[in-house]
Amino acid sequence: QAQQLFVPVLTGVDKEVFRRDIYPMRRPVVLRDVGLGPCLDKWTLEYLTQKGGNCEVKVHVSTVPQMDFLHKNFVYRTLPFDKFIQRAAEKKHSDFFLCQDESYYLRSLGEDVRKEPADLRKQFPELAEDFHIPEFFESDQLFSSVFRISSCGLQLWTHYDVMDNLLAQVTGKKRVVLYSPEDALHLYLSGDKSEVLDIDSPDLERFPEFVKACRYECVLEPGDLLFIPALWFHNTLALQFGVGVNIFWRHLPAERYDKKDPYGNKDPVAATRALQTLERALHILDELPPDYRDFYGRRMVLRIQNRTYCSQQGGAAQGDYD
């Protein structure tokens, strides 16, 4: 049975406390009563429909609520924002693309989706006035502000991002499950995503190591802010129709990130180079007979282990989090 811990909830945290006591720990924390602005009272269905207008948005549509990016069990469809909001909020649809109980998910995009990160102030200027971005980082570090709106019951695949992230829950409740970067070896990764889709009832014949990954969990209420440090894996489940805003910012110097990355999820430039070099090294090993390949592969693993963060510093102890 996997170990489960709850993400700590802190109230009334200001920028000074966040920067001094929370940020250096590199652990998820729920921040309550931060003050997200009038959006908490204003963002009713009617208000969102009216102020968001009929600009076209590209949304994920799926016949099942558990969306899977690896096997693409969803389609992309375009809807006017006001129509999308109405559909996402209802359980059964009279108008639909695939089936009556299809699920919807919006991750807002920049004007030029290949070049520009999402910016609430540009895409939804009237709604952006209601939402106060918490000033927990310097303004020049801000990378993107992303609308996330999902049908009740919608679950998003487990993945990591390469930038620090504040997930603000404005309306509705959302469960978030997180896993530490230190548990990456137990998550069956394919790129930045885990192949374990059902984290609540995992197939342990296919994924026996998954039980070794410590699970951190929280339920976000309207007004809550979840700090998700870069590289922490997260999986979200909308317990109700809900509207949230993600704020991504650059934790590393700007030049470390891939400049052609409007989503904020491409690995840092040096990490990409290192992974590519590793692939080349593995191809070179293929020139050896199997027993030699096995021996030198083990030596490479040992070398990598000796250079990793965990083996040198141990990370934060589990006990720090109980």
Image (cartoon, rainbow, N blue to C red):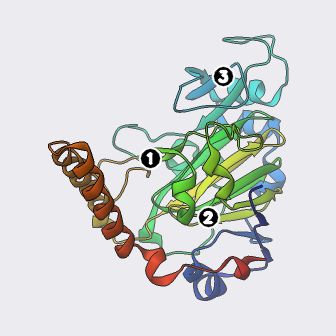
Nearest the eye: 194 or 298: 298
Task: Kindly tell me whether residue 142 is visible in this rendering.
Answer: yes
In the picture, measured across the screen, residue 10 lies left or right of residue 300, that is: right
Q: Residues within 10 Å of mark 2 (few under 14, many from 20)?
A: some
On screen, residue 129 above or below 108: below
Residue 202 image point, x, y percent: 71, 40
Q: Amino acid at mark 1?
A: Tyr
**Distance (Cα) linking label 1 and label 2:** 18 Å
Front position among marks 3 and 2: 3
Marks 1 & 3, CB-CB < 8 Å contact: no
From the top left corner, tell me how far across and down residue 78 is, in percent: 56, 21
**Does 296 appear above or below 28?**
above
The kind of residue tagged 3 is Ser
Q: Residue at x 14, y 43 (%)?
A: 287
The residue identified by callout 2 is 133
Secondary structure under tag 2 reads: loop
Few, some or many residues within 10 Å of mark 1 (<14, 14–19, 20+): many
Q: CA distance from mark 1 to mark 3?
A: 21 Å
Q: Residue at x 27, y 66 (%)?
A: 255
Instruction: Name the N-terminal-most of marks 1 and 3.
Output: 3
Q: Nearer the viewer, mark 1 or mark 2?
A: 1
Mark linked to residue 174 = none
Residue 263 tag number: 1
3 sits left or right of 284 in the view: right
The residue that disc 3 covers is 62
Residue type at mark 2? Ile
Characterize the local packing of mark 3: few (<14), some (14-19) or many (20 or more) Cα atoms within 10 angstroms: many
